[in-house]
Image (spheres, rainbow, N blue to C red):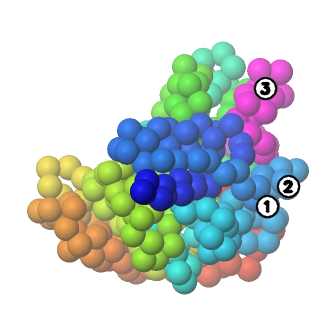
């Protein structure tokens, strides 16, 4: 008698071109590893209200919650998230089972005529709806004009090409995944410009204890990336708890050491305040559970140093008004 065929692994994603592109890459890797996979498109509140700044939608997780509900309801088995969009608070019954290899984690300046951030003329208009990006632009070039801009990558680039803006700041990872790396004028990197927590990395979320789904995604996990984003997210969780806080940071593994640097940002009038802290830890076996515990501890250590340097007071001042300000 023929054996009973198992159901395919259902992978959930948002329906934007970028989300579908990065999910397609994940699915292709899963199929090469031997899994039978189908894609399910889930609409999120962040997608349906593209007319509003993300923070105006009321909370963090606007690109995530519907995918998590689909997981909990059993409609999908794996959710593909951009980790920079994921709140740090754990959801009961769910876990991030896999973090594939990260692409470029930094922001990129995209200019109409090839200017860098340093060479843009005074009064040039820069498009972004991110407090983190806007504050760092103001710190580096207070003579530039920052105008809010939302929409998918194609929409934003179209506004730039039409002359509505002189330059945009976008995640380099999104441009790379869409085959638009050639649009990058220059990368914006630390120590001048710090990326969002988790930027450039994907998180594959599953139901806790779902061994079938875990087996399907396990071959995609990159231990160095997983450790790095755990350190970043642990720091953010201790500082502010969500992806909407104006916190930037980057972690990486170099010669067996996991390094984390994080910055808390605040703008008051024309004054920009930035507090930065960093540290590192030796990690002998990145795939070992002890490595993930060490990454979490590193994040908490850097968070404590930021608080000691004044970041706690900065974040407390911002909590009352952050939901009224555009953040991405």
Q: Which residue is mark 1?
A: 45
Outermost left residue: 284
Which callout, 3 or 1, points at the residue further toward the start of the chain? 1
Secondary structure, mark 1, is helix
Q: Which mark is residue 158?
A: 3
Tell me if residue 197 can be seen.
Answer: no
Which quadrant would the C terminus be assigned to in this image? bottom right
Q: Position of residue 74 (x, y in %)?
A: 62, 70
Q: Are marks 2 and 3 in contact (CB under 8 Å)?
A: no
Q: Residue at x 27, y 65 (%)?
A: 279
Q: CA distance from mark 3 to mark 1?
A: 23 Å
Tell me if residue 78 can be seen.
Answer: yes
Q: Position of residue 107 (x, y in %)?
A: 53, 41
Q: Are marks 2 and 1 in contact (CB under 8 Å)?
A: yes
Q: Residue at x 62, y 75 (%)?
A: 72
Above or below, 327 against 192 in this view is below
Secondary structure, mark 3, is helix
Q: Which residue is mark 2?
A: 49
Q: CA distance from mark 2 to mark 3?
A: 19 Å
Q: Residue at x 36, y 60 (%)?
A: 215
Judged by depth in the image, the label closer to the viewer, 3 or 1, is 1
Which callout, 2 or 3, points at the residue further toward the start of the chain? 2
Residue range (magenta): 141-164
Above or below, 186 against 11 in this view is above
Above or below, 110 against 318 in this view is above
* Quadrant of residue 164 within the rendered picture: top right
Q: Position of residue 176 (x, y in %)?
A: 52, 31
Outermost top residue: 113
């Amino acid at each position: 008698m023929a054996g009973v065929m198992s159901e395919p692994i259902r992978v959930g994603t948002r329906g934007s071109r970028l989300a579908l592109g990065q999910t397609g890459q994940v699915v292709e890797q899963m199929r090469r590893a031997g899994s039978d996979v189908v894609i399910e498109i889930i609409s999120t509140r962040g997608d349906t209200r593209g007319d509003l700044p993300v923070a105006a939608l009321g909370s963090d997780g606007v690109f995530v919650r519907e995918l998590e509900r689909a997981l909990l309801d059993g409609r999908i088995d794996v959710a593909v998230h951009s980790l920079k969009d994921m709140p740090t608070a754990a959801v009961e019954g769910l876990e991030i089972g896999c973090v594939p290899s990260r692409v470029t984690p930094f922001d990129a300046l995209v200019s109409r005529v090839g200017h860098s951030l340093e060479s843009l003329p005074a009064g040039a208009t820069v498009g972004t709806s991110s407090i983190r990006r806007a504050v760092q632009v103001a710190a580096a070039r207070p003579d530039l004009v920052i105008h809010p801009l939302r929409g998918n990558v194609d929409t934003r680039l179209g506004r730039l090409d039409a002359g509505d803006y002189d330059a945009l700041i976008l995640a380099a990872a999104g441009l790379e995944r869409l085959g638009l790396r050639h649009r990058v004028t220059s990368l914006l990197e630390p120590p001048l410009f710090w990326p969002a927590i988790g930027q450039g990395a994907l998180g594959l979320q599953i139901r806790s204890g779902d061994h079938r789904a875990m087996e399907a995604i396990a071959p995609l996990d990159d231990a160095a990336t997983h450790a790095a984003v755990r350190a970043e997210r642990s720091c953010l969780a201790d500082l502010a708890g969500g992806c909407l806080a104006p916190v930037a940071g980057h972690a990486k593994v170099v010669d067996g050491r996991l390094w984390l640097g994080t910055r808390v940002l605040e703008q008051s009038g024309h004054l920009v305040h930035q507090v930065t802290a960093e540290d590192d830890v030796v990690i002998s076996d990145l795939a070992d559970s002890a490595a993930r515990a060490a990454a979490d501890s590193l994040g908490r250590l850097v968070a404590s140093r930021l608080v000691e340097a004044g970041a706690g007071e900065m974040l407390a001042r911002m909590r009352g008004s952050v939901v009224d300000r555009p953040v991405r």
